[in-house]
Image (spheres, rainbow, N blue to C red):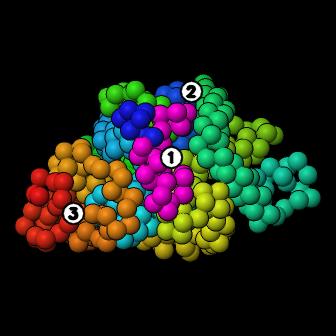
Amino acid sequence: MSTNTETATATQIQHAGVDESLIPKTLEGRTVSPIDYMFMWIGDGVNLGNMTLGASLVVAGIATLNLFQTFAAAIIAIGIISTIFALNDRLGYRTGIPYVVQLRMSFGIKGSVISSLLRGIPAIVWYGFQSWIGGTALNEIAKVFTGGAFDNVAVCFVVLQLVQIGLSLYGFHAIKWVESLTSIVIMLALVYVFGVLLTSHSAVIAEKWVHAKGSWGLPFFAFIMMFMGNYAAIFLSAADYSRELKAGISDAKRGFLYFLPILIAYGFVLAIGAMLASATGISNPVKAFAIVVDNSYITVFVSAFIVMGAIAVNMVANIIPPTYVITLITKLKYKVAVTITGLLALGSFPWVLVQDSSAKGLGMFILIYSAFLGPIVSILLIDYYIFRKQKVDIVDLYKENGPYSGYNPAAVLAMLIGAGAAFTKVELAWIIGLVVAGISYYLLTKFAFKDSRFKKGTIFE
């Protein structure tokens, strides 16, 4: 898209009553370089949750997957993730629109409210959850430095949340440098831990994990699905990230910008998680750390890792998407919306979610919202690539009374059908929902709702 066209589009959209943060990014407004983009995804991947995923491979001292199977599953999953990322980020990259506006193409202006909330609400809950975990770790650091005089997790949680709200006010400018800093620091720390594990525990790690029999059956495919599930929400809103990336990068290169950093971050963190569990027999990485790196600074080291990891994940995955949703629905300015997002995360009662008694409820919450994510991304991809042949009038997406007003019944119904099918087999929920919703959307659009305005500009017009 030329600069003149971009300027004309931006001018037309400025009168559509949306905040400037939702207007298509111009070429000059894109400041994230490929290197910064890679660091962003490395920062998102190196966190305690992903390390726990690696540790979960070792159950009761026996690895369900050996070293080769683990990385074979990881590479397959990352390959699929990177492909979907590069496909779903293309509209945002080419036109500069965010995810909440992209949704209007398939679901309509009113229909997109429902589908955007399915991405925004879980992100707010996880924002609070990650911040509480980070606040707990920050409290441990405070106890060490004050000799136990200070001990208040709630205060640390609020302080950490206020810091994140302050950082998020600067948008992607803050994300860019925060992710670069955290990814470098955390990776250096993990290199040290990796070295300790290799020098002191290599024999037991080789026996328990590297040379384990493992499985090429359901555990192997379940791990792939679990891996993809971790990214389901993020690649759904891929446009929110790609619209910030500097122009001139081919689709293949963008796919590489996802594949390489996710492979580096996840590969390293998964390996350390599995190695820690093998060496200690403990699946909780925090407790395993304390045994492996046994010195007076271990509490501060582990706690700092958790705090930085929580901030890194929130900055990428849990702040921008719900902020755009709030901005679109309420017409508020970006800085007000991002502050509200942080305050809502404060009120998500994360101290309840981290309790053992809440684990079942939290698992049910994850299951319910994730069942809708595969169907939504399937509908977006089919609409853009098959129905519209990658041709979308961006200005129309911003017209409240334009061709995308109201809701698209075919998309909403297909999403519900796909989500319903996803619940039939939990282990494969994401892929089932994706396939069933995609087929349903194609058939419903072609054979039903014959007078639907959403057929305009498609192959069914």
The three-letter amino acid code for the residue at tag 1 is: Asn
* Separation of residues labelled 3 and 2 (CA atoms): 58 Å
**Label ID, residue 454:** 3
Q: Earlier in the sequence, mark 2 or mark 1?
A: 1
The three-letter amino acid code for the residue at tag 2 is: Leu
> In this picture, is 152 found above or below 264?
below
Residue drawn at the location 36% of the way across and 35% of the way down: 1
Specify whether residue 178 is in view: yes
Span colored in magenta:
8-32
Image quarter of residue 77: top left
Residue identifier under label 1 = 50
* Separation of residues labelled 2 and 1 (CA atoms): 20 Å
Q: Is residue 197 left or right of residue 68?
A: right
Q: Is residue 10 magenta?
A: yes
Asked whether 233 or 423 is in front, the reply is 233
Residue drawn at the location 92% of the way across and 58% of the way down: 149
SS at badge 1 = helix
Q: Is residue 150 left or right of residue 209?
A: right
Residue 159 on image: x %, y %: 78, 58
Residue drawn at the location 44% of the way across and 53% of the way down: 13
The three-letter amino acid code for the residue at tag 3 is: Phe
Residue drawn at the location 46% of the way across and 47% of the way down: 10
Residue 223 on image: x %, y %: 35, 48
> In this picture, is 239 found above or below 42?
below
Residue 3 on image: x %, y %: 43, 33
Residue identifier under label 2 = 198
Q: Is residue 163 left or right of residue 56?
A: right
